[in-house]
Amino acid sequence: MPENLLEYKCPCCGGKIEFNSALQKMKCPFCDTEFDVDTLKNYDTVLNDSTPTQMDWDRTQNQEWRQGETENMLVYSCNSCGGEIICDKTTAATHCPFCGNPVIIMGQFTGELRPDLVIPFKLDKEAAVAAFKNHLKGKTLLPKAFKTDSHIEEIKGVYVPFWLFNSRANGHIKYRATKVRTWSDRDYIYTDTSYFSVVRKGTLDFENIPVDSSSKIDNDITESLEPFDLSQAVDFQTAYLSGYLADKYDVSEDKSVERANQRVSKSTEKEFSATVTGYTTVHTENVNIQLDNAKAKYALFPVWLMTTKWNGKNYIFAMNGQTGKFVGNLPMDGGAFCKWLFGIAGVVAAVALMIMRLMWLA
Amino acid sequence: MKKILSVICVIPVILAMTLALAAPVYASEAETETAAELHHVINPDGVISEKNANKIETAAEAVFEKNGIDLFTVITKEETPDFENTVDSIYKNTARKKAAVILLMDSENAYLITRGRAENIFSSDELDEILAQSLKQKNRAAMLLRFVKLTGASLTEKGVEPIPDGRLLPRLVDEAELLSKSEAEKLLATLDEISERRQLDIVVVTNNSLGEKNVTQYADDFFDYNGYGFGENHDGILLLLSMDTREWAISTCGSGIDIFTDRGQEYMTDEFLPYISDGEYYDGFNRFAELCDEFAGEYADSGKAYDYGNMPKQPFGWFKAIIGSLAIGLVAGLIVALVLCSQLNSVKPQNLADEYAKKGSLKLTEKNDLYLYHTITRTARPKDTDSSSGGSSGGSSSHSSSSGSSHGGSHGHF
């Protein structure tokens, strides 16, 4: 198997170095030496060259595994301590569970699998934890116990794989529109309704529509985290992954494009109908949108994922590692809901009754 | 209304002169003698003899007894310079039932004048006719007598009867027997109480047949000839139900005309007629009495009758108001609760790709707005049903009854 494990070692002290989101540089946690990512680029290639001799990775099939259980698993051994790293097939970057050193599985990024772009993490774990606490603030119907009892079970910085689609929409949309004019004389009100057939034909270009290509994360969550700022994206370097988790895609480009196309079609319809102006009513009669998709780009976007457990249920939260946008559904306190519902209803009803009575008395 | 007719007198001036010479002594005697007896004949100059005067007086008194209208005859030698004043003072001082027909005759002219209710009884044509007929007689005494007889006959023909000074019947006359005995007693007590308190007769009448009269005439006449109404203006209101034709009528009189405006009566009937239509007579009459009380109270308190722009308040519907405000409250509560609830959910799919559209990349290759056809429809403008804004209408319309008194009212079927 061609898969390799990669560890970035500090050229000064040999310690394991990680990408530091605050500095946007590589930093050795042991000797505090900082390195530019670009500097490491060359170092990267040097390492790659030397890996075959250095890396004695082994994919052992333990006989104690039952049939099928290992289908989605790969086992590596850590470069530093030799411990067994068990991960699933899509894992591309992780930590060694024994020595905690960041590990990158090179085999997940070779050839077709090499991402075109990566947006490096801008926000660190502390920022994510703070954002989580902030997320719980001001939520009136959140059960009070949730704030105190729930604690973050797991927090991980993950580079989530995305397909970025470029597409050109060729739209041909027909509308039925009316213009209504009314006037009146002494006895009658006249309504003049003019009917129009409106046609709009044209193109609209879309760029870099992201579609989450990892089946591990719910698409609703990744879409909620949008937008990512692509202007800050850089060419992929494995160095950026050091210290974080990463997955490779497991949903193909062909499958993902459907979701992108749905969104493009809806937006195209909206943009086109915005050009149909000056009418009283506009009714869409016929929509025909053809989409030309260019080859998709493969990108890794930074996401902080958190899970908490409360009352036996898991809650998943996610933060955009670039912009800090935080999402995650929270449980509702049914009692508080009723209190608010009937409290407000009671107060408003009392005020309304008073107003009615006063109006009657006036 | 007054009717003046000039008559060319054929009596020679000389005759008049001689009469004038004899007059002072004769007249003074006549005055002392007739002041007590001759109520209707004013004969200061003794133009007609005492015997004739007594004859006319008797005839006039008979008309008064029968029809309740005073017929005055004034005969003088000299021209009356200000006959209007003379007529007014006669009417004010001597007419007993607020109605008088006065015949003024001097050497030159004859005037026939009506005052009070009588103004409403005779048209000018009728007065012309009576005067013309009267003047055909040979002498003055005959003319006067003729006038009294003709007028009396006309009054009888018109069905004019004396209006009694006091109330002859109770305030509830249930000829059609729509109410049980206990209901009738209770209603009558209510009517009496309100009437006395408001100094306004509130009368409920039911009957089985209107006879020759229409429903309004019947109601007016029933009010007049049974002496309903407080005070000299006969303040009151009467509700009549006639069962054979299922007609109702309201007749108002005196201050009742002002209190119960046309709009006010419309409001009242909307309130109490549904009961009557349903056969709930007691409830309907009771509601009518309540409304009369309410209307009279408003008039007494504010000096303004219920009319356009000043209608009684519907009673405050607590039930409706509570249900309504609860509904408003629940909607408001639900909105707030759902908004609070939506704070908890931050995961939602993005269905649009607007932010990924290249700015300015929208290129329309075809932009075609084709006119097809047009239709024109017209609907009638809603008519202004509430004319309160118009301000033109309002108030009470009135008419005169057979007795000549003014009545307001309304009528209809139930």
Image (spheres, coloured by chain):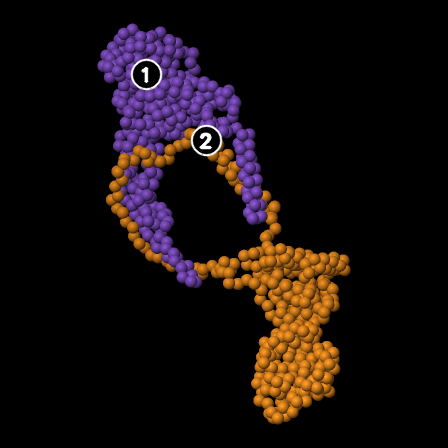
Chain colours: A purple, B orange
Q: What percent of the width, then of the height, locates residue B55? A: 72, 85
**Which residue position holds label 2?**
B343
Looking at the image, residue A318 lies above or below residue A291 = above
Q: Amino acid at mark 1?
A: Asn
Do pointers 2 and 1 mark residues of a single chain? no
Label 2 to label 1, Cα distance in Å? 33 Å
**Chain of the residue displaying label 2:** B
Q: Residue at x 74, y 80 (%)?
A: B37
Q: Nearer the viewer, residue A259 or B402?
A: B402
For residue A297, say whether it is visible: yes
Is B177 left or right of B401, judged from the image as shown? right
For residue B142, say whether it is visible: no
Q: Nearer the viewer, residue B224 or A195?
A: B224
**Which residue position holds label 1?**
A20
Q: Residues within 10 Å of mark 2 (few under 14, many from 20)?
A: some
SS under mark 2: loop
